[in-house]
Image: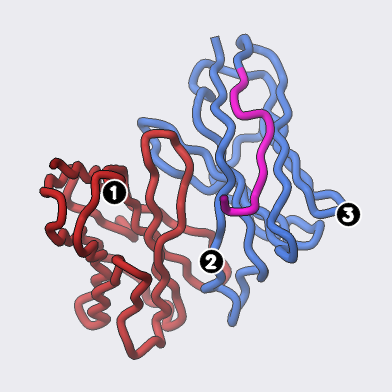
């Protein structure tokens, strides 16, 4: 158990719908990262928050958004869902921000949310 | 250009044997970290081992060791005394300053009895 929790574990929805994935980081970790894992794209970084502020953005679609709340939990919102959004979505957390001196922080992953868009 | 390359899509090993999973990386950042993660069929991503670019010694964690050859830009994972439970997908990843993890495509390891 990494200490990172994600809910729900599975999500099945229809095209055009909107869903929210939730993540709670390990105690003491200030950074939360979201990753998408699909068969064709592999593991891709979406977005990072550090202590409530957006810190880095990866290949995140405009239909997707995220935020980190004062209690440090994070939510990833996916809207206007398409078939191609079906994937395993991971949240990870680490202590540091990723800037110099903390770029080597280990990221611990949650169990993931498997999203199926029908 | 690929930042992380794992050239072995699949590896097969017998129980109790050692196995090496290859990983090469590409970076010009002098400060970076290299990580290995295990993903069993259940789907979770499990952190195995970490090597910092300034670390002089190879990292070890129980049966896992990282063969770090900085000049060759390689960070191979060595699993000693393989067990059936080691059957999984293994990902090599790198983090440069100010970036998130960049993953390789993974290697599937199958351990047989």
Residue A36 placement (x, y as % from top left): 52, 39
- Per the model, the C-alpha gap separating discs 3 and 2 is 22 Å
Residue B12 placement (x, y as % from top left): 12, 45
Say which element carries label 2. Answer: loop
Residue B92 placement (x, y as % from top left): 34, 58
> Disc 2: which chain?
A
Name the quarter where the C terminus of chain A is drawn: top right
Say which element carries label 3. Answer: loop
Spot the residue most to the right: A70
- Per the model, the C-alpha gap separating discs 3 and 1 is 39 Å
Does the CB distance between marks 2 and 1 fall below 8 Å?
no
Q: Residues within 10 Å of mark 2 (few under 14, many from 20)?
A: many
The chain whose colour is blue is: A
Q: Residues within 10 Å of mark 3 (few under 14, many from 20)?
A: few
Q: Nearer the viewer, mark 3 or mark 1?
A: 1
The chain whose colour is red is: B
The residue singled out by tag 3 in the image is A70
Circle on res. B54 = none
* Magenta range: A1-11
Image: A98 above or below B56: above
The residue singled out by tag 2 in the image is A106
Question: Does A6 sit left or right of B65 as displayed?
Answer: right
The residue singled out by tag 1 in the image is B86
> Disc 3: which chain?
A
Marks 2 and 1 belong to one chain: no
């Amino acid at each position: 158990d990494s200490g990172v929790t994600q809910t729900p574990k599975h999500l099945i929805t229809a095209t055009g719908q909107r869903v929210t994935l939730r993540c709670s980081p390990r105690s003491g970790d200030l950074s939360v990262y979201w990753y998408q894992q699909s068969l064709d794209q592999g593991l891709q970084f979406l977005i990072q928050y550090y202590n409530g502020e957006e810190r880095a953005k990866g290949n995140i679609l405009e239909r997707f958004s995220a935020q980190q709340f004062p209690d440090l939990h994070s939510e990833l919102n996916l809207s206007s869902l398409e078939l191609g959004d079906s994937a395993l979505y991971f949240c990870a957390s680490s202590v540091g921000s990723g800037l110099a001196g903390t770029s080597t922080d280990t990221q611990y992953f949650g169990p993931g949310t498997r999203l199926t868009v029908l | 250009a690929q930042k992380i390359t794992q050239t072995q899509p699949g590896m097969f090993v017998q129980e109790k044997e050692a196995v090496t999973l290859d990983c090469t990386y590409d970076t010009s950042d002098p400060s970076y970290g290299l990580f290995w993660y295990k993903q069993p069929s259940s789907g979770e991503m499990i952190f195995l081992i970490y090597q910092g670019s300034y670390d002089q010694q190879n990292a070890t964690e129980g049966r896992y060791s990282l063969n770090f050859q900085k000049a060759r830009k390689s960070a191979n994972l060595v699993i000693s005394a393989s067990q059936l439970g080691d059957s999984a997908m293994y990902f090599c990843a790198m983090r440069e300053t100010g970036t998130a993890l960049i993953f390789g495509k993974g290697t599937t390891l199958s351990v047989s009895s």
